[in-house]
Image: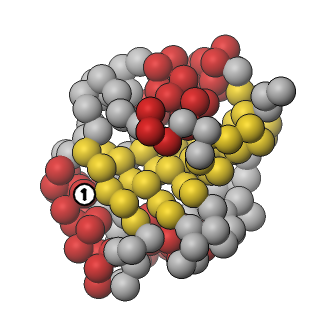
Amino acid sequence: MTQHVCPWWLGYTFITPLRRLFQDPLKILAPYVHEGMTVLEPGPGMGFFTLDMARLVGSSGQVFAIDLQPEMLKVLRRRAVKAGLQGRVQSRLAQSDSLDIADLNRTVDFVLAFAMVHEVPAAHSFFGEMFDALKPGGTLLLAEPRGHVGAAAFQAELDTGAQVGFQVEPGPSIRRSYSALLEKREA
């Protein structure tokens, strides 16, 4: 599901501890991710958010990290092992046109789509897969970097999410990013 992805080796710049000064994963995620949850993270890169989500879901939860680049997943798995979190993080390789997550339909409590939707060629398909994966009442936190995505492009992403069926709400304040919460409200 990609048109232009960040080169895998650039992923090392995104996991630097200095990034926590302006984008602290625990502060961003703690209101949404809790013990026992099933979490989906498409485009996790090398796991800047993944490891903290694995800590938040605890030993009874699970984080599914799905990326198109095997090199990113290799580093993510190595980091999860080093942190003692390998049992909570399941990494999967995505297909070029799909995340291939039909087996997760209606099982996911929370999705984190951080700085990656602008890289998918078919946002409608992406949001459709996320909608299907989420349980009713599940939430998707969408964040896009202001440096790469303009206000109109971000609004287009939100409009696409709404077309799929998400209820769009304002997101948390995340430095250098646009954000929104997309909730699956289904009867």
Q: Is residue 118 above or below residue 27?
A: above
The answer to whether residue 59 is left or right of residue 47 is right
The residue lying furthest to the top in this view is: 163
* Dot 1 crowding, Cα within 10 Å, few <14, some 14–19, many 20+: many
The picture places residue 10, in percent across and down from the top left corner, at 22, 55
At x 39%, y 74%, the residue is: 87
Q: Residue furthest right?
A: 187
Q: Amino acid at mark 1?
A: Leu
Quadrant location, the N terminus: top left
Residue 81 image offset from top left, x and y in percent: 29, 79
Viewed as shown, does residue 139 lie left or right of 60? right
Is residue 83 something one can see in this rendering?
yes
Report x, y in % for residue 46: 30, 61
Identify residue for label 1: 73
Eyeballing the image, is 5 above or below 53? Answer: above
Residue 37: give x, y in percent of width and height.
Answer: 63, 62
Residue occupying image coordinates x 79% and y 36%: 169
Q: Is residue 48 above or below residue 136?
A: below
Q: Residue at x 30, y 50 (%)?
A: 92
Locate the C terminus by quadrant. Answer: top right
Q: Secondary structure at mark 1?
A: helix
Quarter of the image where one finds residue 148: top left
Given residues 150 and 48, the one toward you in this image is 48
